[in-house]
Amino acid sequence: MKQGFLLSLLFVALATFAQDKMITKTGKITFEASVPAFEEVKAKNDGVTCVLNSKTGEIATLALMKGFRFKLALMEEHFNENYVESDSYPKAIFKGKIDNFDVSVLTATAKEYTIKGKLEMHGKSKEISMTAKIKKVESGIEIISDFYVNADDYAIAIPSMVKSKVSNKVNVKTEYTVK
């Protein structure tokens, strides 16, 4: 019920998109905080909501933290309980704008765009900028990005006993096909 409320809140906040709104509820975010020579620290969330206003280039995403899946159940438990504290901070939200976005010039060949906005996670928010490859696909518009965030920027503490095994610099990859 709480998740439904959060999704409803996102859609109400983005109601200004009207008919120009394109959406997916099956977007993908993968993050990796692995350090060479140690166990892979990687997770994927296949249930991310992304909304794009195709007229203005405004974009918003919502990822539930408990939606991230790891290879090892124990890593997933530590991630939710000790790192991102999912019960207290259940979601990550990005709201931003794609610079110089014009849906009419999109083709099947990806073009690079800059997306700037605010990422809110773990009770903190920070302005970020990323490069995204955007193209027209049969089922809509595909948006793929690859960028880094620092755990410190979001007050996500890495315990000293695993600090050498988990990177503070986290690689984040996103993939959305909005319709």
Image: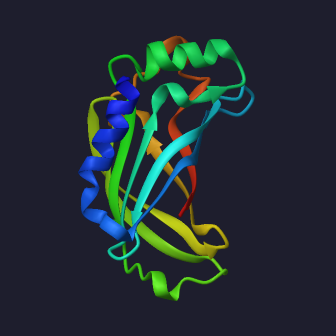
Q: Quadrant of the N terminus?
A: top left
Quarter of the view holding residue 7: top left
Q: Nearer the viewer, residue 118 or 4?
A: 4
Q: Residue furthest right?
A: 37
Q: Left or right: 121 with respect to 34?
A: left
* Image spot of residue 16 (x, y percent): 24, 62
Q: Is residue 64 above or below residue 21?
A: above
Q: Residue furthest front?
A: 19
Q: Left or right: 41 with respect to 103?
A: right
Q: Nearer the viewer, residue 173 or 166?
A: 173
Determine if residue 96 is in view.
Answer: yes
* Image spot of residue 6 (x, y percent): 33, 34
* Image spot of residue 81 (x, y percent): 46, 13
Q: Is residue 47 above or below residue 159?
A: below
Q: Nearer the viewer, residue 51 or 86?
A: 51
* Image spot of residue 166 (x, y percent): 58, 27
Quarter of the view holding residue 123: top left
Residue depicted at 32% across the width and 40% down the height: 8
Residue depicted at 38% across the width and 31% down the height: 4
Q: Residue furthest bottom?
A: 105
Q: Left or right: 78 with respect to 82?
A: right
